[in-house]
């Protein structure tokens, strides 16, 4: 069920030099969370204002940076012993805000109801994972359309101009991902309670 999330250890390894430099410079993990939101804003602006396929490169660069910052903020907090509950809260809020900001880039390109539906659907997998973690389960990530796949779909839309089909796939895939996470958590938590 991990999808592209399975590449996270490989990606984290590629970012180890940047992480070490950030540790030496004593950069705050919260700064990286904010940088991820800024990159999401850049991706949304490029998607909204640049025509396809010209938008593809800047959208891809901004979203790659957004994913890098999403990877680095928690890793940096752990490396420096600066993990806090407030930092965890800020990380989750930053991730949800970044998701919604990127999808807002579709507003000039697709019907409002579809953008809103995709935005709601895109947040469902994370809310389910957070609810499961609050109930004592491990935090689930990945899936058919997790964060990385959503970013890839946005790049496809920027490259092709096929915004309506991409939003439909993003929404349906996010709902499927949420359903799979919920089913797994339901089984896991049911078993845990029976012990």
Image (cartoon, rainbow, N blue to C red):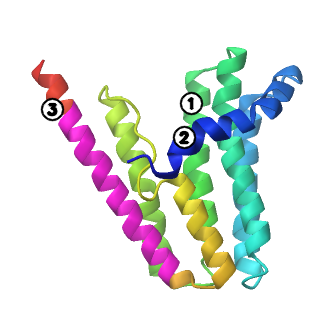
Name which of mark 2 and mark 3 comes first in the sequence.
2
Element type at mark 2: helix
Residue toward you, 85 or 187: 187
Which disc, if any, is residue 92? Answer: 2
Is 182 within the magenta? yes
Residue 71 lies, in percent from the top left, at 65, 38
Label pair 3/1, CB-CB below 8 angstroms: no
Q: Residue furthest top?
A: 81
Residue 54 lies, in percent from the top left, at 79, 80
Which disc, if any, is residue 26? Answer: none
**Label 3 Cα neighbours within 10 Å, binned few <14 / some 14-19 / many ≥20:** few
The residue that mark 1 highlights is: 88
Residue 130 visible (yes or no): yes
**Label 2 Cα neighbours within 10 Å, binned few <14 / some 14-19 / many ≥20:** some
| Image quarter (top left, top right, bottom left or bottom right) of the C terminus | top left
Element type at mark 3: helix
**Picture layout, residue 46 above or below residue 20:** below
The residue that mark 3 highlights is: 190
**Picture layout, residue 119 above or below residue 91:** below
The answer to whether 89 appears left or right of 173 in the picture is right
Give the Cα distance between marks 3 and 1.
Answer: 27 Å
Name which of mark 3 and mark 1 comes first in the sequence.
1
Q: Which residues are magenta?
A: 165-188
Q: Residue at x 68, y 79 (%)?
A: 159
The answer to whether 134 appears left or right of 37 in the picture is left
Element type at mark 1: helix
Residue 105 visible (yes or no): no
Residue 8 lies, in percent from the top left, at 58, 40
Q: Residue at x 45, y 42 (%)?
A: 141
Label pair 2/1, CB-CB below 8 angstroms: yes
């Amino acid at each position: 069920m991990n999808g592209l999330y399975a590449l996270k250890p490989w990606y984290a390894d590629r970012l180890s030099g940047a992480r070490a430099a950030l540790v030496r410079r004593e950069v705050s993990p919260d700064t990286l969370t904010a940088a991820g939101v800024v990159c999401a804003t850049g991706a949304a602006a490029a998607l909204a204002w640049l025509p396809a396929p010209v938008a593809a490169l800047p959208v891809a660069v901004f979203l790659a940076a957004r994913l890098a910052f999403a990877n680095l903020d928690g890793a940096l907090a752990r490396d420096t012993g600066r993990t806090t509950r407030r930092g965890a809260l800020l990380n989750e809020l930053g991730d949800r805000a970044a998701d919604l900001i990127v999808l807002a880039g579709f507003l000039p390109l697709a019907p409002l109801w579809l953008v809103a539906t995709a935005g709601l659907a895109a947040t469902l997998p994370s809310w389910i994972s957070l609810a499961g973690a609050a109930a004592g389960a491990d935090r689930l990530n990945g899936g058919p359309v997790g964060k990385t796949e959503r970013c890839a779909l946005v790049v496809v839309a920027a490259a092709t101009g096929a915004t309506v089909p991409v939003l439909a796939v993003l929404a349906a895939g996010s709902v499927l991902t949420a359903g799979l996470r919920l089913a797994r958590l339901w089984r896991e938590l049911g078993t845990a309670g029976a012990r």
